[in-house]
Amino acid sequence: MKKIFQPFATINRQTVMIMMAVQVVITLLLWHTLSDGLIPKPGKVAGALVQLLGSKLLFDNVLVSLLLTLKAMLYSILITLLFAYLSVLPFFKSLAQFIVKCRYLTLAGLIFVFTLLTKDGSELKLSLLVFGIVPFFVTSFLSVIVNINQQEYELCKTLGYNNWQTLYEVIIIGKADQVFEILRQNFAISWLMITMVEGLSMSEGGIGTLLIKYNKYNDLTNVLALQLVIFTIGLCFDYLLGTLRHWLFPYSRLKQAKA
Amino acid sequence: MTQHTKEEAILQVSNVALTYDRPILRDINFCIRNIVRPGFSQGQVVTLIGRSGIGKTQLFKILSGLQQPTSGQVTIHDNQPVKAGDMGVIFQNYYLFEWRTVHQSLLLAAKKNKALAGKEKQTIDEYAEQFHLTEHLGLYPNQLSGGQRQRVSIMQQLLKGSNFILLDEPFSGLDVCMLDKAVELLLQVSLSDDLKTLIIVSHDIETSVAISDTVFILGTEPGMAGATIKKEIDLIDRDLAWQKGIKQEKRFLETIEEIKGYL
């Protein structure tokens, strides 16, 4: 018992599970006790969640959002890899660094520009998502490149590799597993943005649209139930991408275990 | 004294200096000659000894072509300036690509060796057997012990086909058992080819001197900034080279004391 309050103490898996279960129960009890008339009690939210899970409405909207997110992630990672790999060429370095700084641009001010540049709502949502995600992806990947161990380059040189072969071995092949880690870490950003961009063009639906509709009618019970769905899907993707990374690149598991 | 002749220069270091915000190395001059020993395929084993922080790693990088000196040059093979890739290099922590299995790493090196064209896999298998690594070919570096990593690093550089192998502190962090094995392995490599040349950069005086034929001592001189070669000791002339169990002999211990005096 003492151990769980000691710095850097190692606790077994069973203790972690029990501790987490206790924390969840405490949170639910606090929520139940402290919620007044405006904030729905956990039982009510759970009921709405069960109802929502049984409806075709949720399935259809989640599917729309997931497809849009996956499409945006695919385009974003392709653009990111292109600029990140090119960033080792001095000509493209400044361009990659500019993309990194684009994190500070707010989408709200650019929606009209994007509306003019795209032909329909679907394209608008996709381009906004890609524009919002790419700077974060590029930032993460450039940080991976900057932190590459100097010995990786030196080993290439001692093996007689030229600069292009070094780029291929150290960055493209050597950091392929990191692409999945970046996807996993930044999936949250795309998932966060999806609810925002779906509010801009509501014709195709999506969880963002659904959330805005519930919010509009102050249906806080369904808003919280939907938030639970969004949260769970996010966790599932986090797990899925992590598992996929370890399966495709077995050495990443060893690296993690050693760390 | 063991019968031998010193033939052509195979590596020449001329007036090498390295300066950052202050001089690190200055006036580094030495030459490694091909030693011919009748009846033996005897390579060269040279040790560069110096205190920690004296500039050994910088000299190591200059010799391997990974770093350009501020002035001077290192030449090999008919006066050609050394460039990265000419030397086999084994880093202190036996660095290997962590995303490649042992076999993949070795194959990358073997493919760089034109003499092995078409028989890379066969050669890897032969080396793996010789180095007791056959069962580890499918493993990743993170699954290997320190000793196994060292053997893979040495194999990788041997497969690359360079006659020169530079080793940065090859004995640091090894336990007594592993140390003996590492020494045996290096001797085995030095005897594999007449032109095979091991250049060991180390501060482990006893172990390095016991397997070397020549020692260069890197140190500073009073009133002069930057390290230089203070002394060259020909261990063959002293009848200390190529002898097993030399560590217990009085003349070896006297040489060690002499070296320590220069540091």
Image (spheres, rainbow, N blue to C red):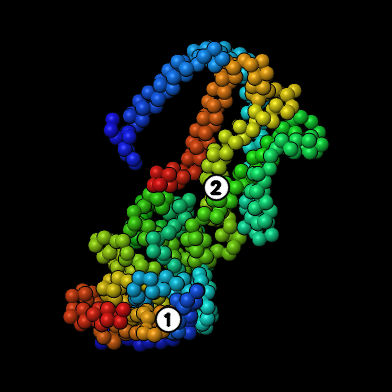
A166 relative to A61, above or below: below
**Residue A216 appears left or right of A257:** right
The x, y position of residue A26, in whole percent, is: 40, 21
Residue drawn at x 45%, y 72% as measured from the top left:
B58
- Looking at the rendered structure, which numbered label has been put on residue B245? none
The x, y position of residue B172, in whole percent, is: 32, 64
- Give the alpha-carbon distance from disc 2 to disc 1, as whole Å: 46 Å
Q: Secondary structure at mark 1?
A: loop
A105 relative to A199, above or below: below
Residue drawn at x 43%, y 79% as measured from the top left:
B226
Label 2 neighbourhood size at 10 Å, few (<14), some (14-19), many (20+)? Answer: some
Label 1 neighbourhood size at 10 Å, few (<14), some (14-19), many (20+)? Answer: few
Residue drawn at x 51%, y 55% as measured from the top left:
A148
The x, y position of residue A159, in whole percent, is: 50, 64
Q: What chain does mark 2 sit on?
A: A
Residue drawn at x 29%, y 84% as measured from the top left:
B236
- Looking at the rendered structure, which numbered label has been put on residue A176? 2
The quadrant where residue B184 appears:
bottom left
> Mark 1 belongs to which amino acid?
Ala
A87 relative to A74, above or below: below
**Residue B216 appears left or right of A193:** left
Q: Which residue is mark 1?
A: B225
The x, y position of residue B134, in whole percent, is: 37, 54
Residue A234, can we see it?
Answer: yes
> Mark 2 belongs to which amino acid?
Ala
Residue B193, can we see it?
Answer: no
